[in-house]
Amino acid sequence: LCGDRAGNLFLAQGQFIDIVTPNGMRSHLAGTGEDGYRDGAAHQAEFRLGLIVKYRVHNLACGPDGSVYVADGGNRRIRRIHQQQGQWRVDTWAGGGGRQLAPGESAAPLAVAFSGTLAVAVTPQGEVTLADDYGAYRVTADGREIRYLGRWPASAFYPGAKPGNLNVMMGDADRAGNVYFVSRTPDAVIRISPAGEVRHVAGRATRDKAQQLAGDGPPLHSFFNTPDSIAVQPDGSAIYVCGGDEYNIRRIPGDGAGATATLMQNGRWYRASVHPNKSRGSAVVRPGANGKLKPDGDLTLLMVSHLLGRDAQGNLYGSLNHWSGM
């Protein structure tokens, strides 16, 4: 989800984009519910959200003008939902072409081809920054030009491995125009400055079991277990990630100083309330639970097993999941 300055929330679920107004009313904003590819009137538009892409990634970004940008990974495109003469419409903002760009090269946004997972973030200036397996791109606010910023930093990959592809899951931006993306396997947080500098700021890519269990610490020495979501405080003071196999919300200091911190935890993959060290804090749900998950076992509820996003004020939103049949 994402939130605009008017207090609306926009949510992706299935092949719909929904709107939740400040008074709590929810309705379908865009999509027919069927997967496909169609621009035009929002209620007739079609998406392929979470299809034909690794990890079924979903990502929305709210722009400063009220537009909503959708990472339509199944169609390898960035779609924009916006109002035109009082009516909501959907158009394609980038992707769908066949051109591969070199670092620093620019082209028309619809001429470029994207690959793998796809994520999007929008700066307060209205520039759309997007990421695929191979690196980061930036689209001008008027939508006329896209520039390939470059490949992902070598430090984000496993030691000794050649720099390759990141499975980018979600993106967000702060008021200063910095953009952040999180990837899983390798597990890293990337920051892109307003000038287009691509930097690895958190997450250690390691296969060493002892390092993976090291708990919280300096951002570049902390291990995030398959993070699949990210949200950033609007002032850039903190970055939040949540792990797909970790079920924790972790806080990363925005300035890179100090250490990461676990805000919420429920246990590791298949284990209840078990964590590598005491710095992770106590369990949020059923703190006395232990042992492996079972259909009727102690741990059948996971609090915030996914971080869905934030609103314009920086409030975080997560999901409450019931597990069964484990």
Image (spheres, helix red, strand yellow):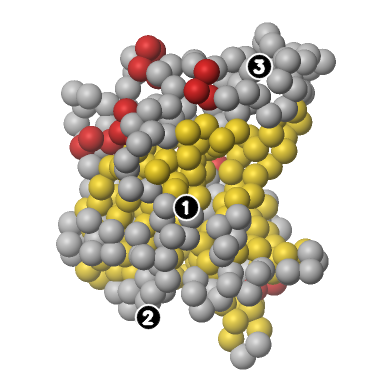
Residue found at the far top of this picture: 291
Q: 20 or 98, which is in the foreground?
A: 20
Q: 159 or 237, which is in the foreground?
A: 237
Label 2 vs label 3: CA separation?
49 Å
Label 1 vs label 3: CA separation?
28 Å
Circle nearer the viewer, 2 or 3: 3
**Residue 255 vertical placement versus 71 (above, below):** above
Label 1 vs label 2: CA separation?
25 Å
Identify the mark at residue 310; answer none if there is no mark. none
Helix, strand or loop under label 2:
loop
| Residue 99 appears in the picture as rendered | no
Count how many numbered circles sit on residues in the image.
3
Say whether marks 1 and 3 touch (CB < 8 Å).
no
Identify the mark at residue 272; answer none if there is no mark. 3
Q: Quadrant of residue 120?
A: bottom left
Q: Amino acid at mark 3?
A: Ala
Mark sitting earlier along the chain (1/3): 1
- Please report the residue visible at 63 percent of the width from the left and 23 percent of the height from the top: 282
Mark sitting earlier along the chain (2/3): 2
Residue at the spot of label 2 = 142
Mark sitting earlier along the chain (1/2): 2
- Please report the residue visible at 72 percent of the width from the left and 38 percent of the height from the top: 320
Circle nearer the viewer, 1 or 2: 1
Q: Quadrant of residue 269?
A: top right
Q: Position of residue 59 (x, y in %)?
A: 53, 53
**Residue 36 vertical placement versus 307 (above, below):** below
Residue at the spot of label 1 = 232
Q: Quadrant of residue 222?
A: top left
Helix, strand or loop under label 3:
loop
Quadrant location, the C terminus: top right
